[in-house]
Amino acid sequence: MNRSTRHLLVGVAGALFAATALVAQTPTQKREAHETQRDINQQKRIEQGEKSGQLTPKEAGRLERQEGRIDRAEAKADANGHVSKKEAAHINRMQNRESRRIHRQKHDAQTTK
């Protein structure tokens, strides 16, 4: 094998390795971006409910505390540098429950005085 062929093979192998690493990281990054955007959206929904009077201060505080619990669960799951599918599913369930709570609280009969 001559020198140029060897360099070509090393280059191709390096490119394949880099592409594999990039593909392997993509789902996690997408999931993290989705979770972050979801946190932002839910926070906006709570703030909008407070401003419009659909949420009482007590309801808003309760929803904020639950958002904090979800944030801590996300940080704990990411502490080792990798969020497993099981951890991601648990966080997703927490987010789904919180979204339903926000909707219920905003649409109940209670309003600020």
Image: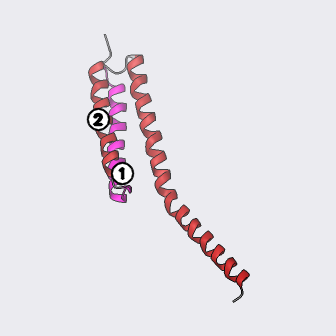
Q: Which mark is residue 66?
A: 2
* Residue nearest the viewer, comparing 18 with 70: 18
Quarter-of-image position of residue 55: top left
Q: Decide if residue 65 is on the left or right side of residue 42.
A: left
* Residue nearest the viewer, comparing 14 with 49: 14
Quarter-of-image position of residue 22: bottom right
* Residue nearest the viewer, comparing 28 with 52: 28
Residue located at (47% from left, 40% from top):
37
Q: Position of residue 97 (x, y in %)?
A: 32, 41
Q: CA distance from mark 1 to mark 2?
A: 18 Å
Reply above or below: 98 against 111: below
Q: Which mark is residue 78?
A: 1
Q: Quadrant of the C terminus?
A: top left
For badge 1, the amino acid type reads Asp
Q: Which residues are magenta?
A: 81-109
Question: Mark 1 or mark 2, which is nearer to you?
Answer: 1
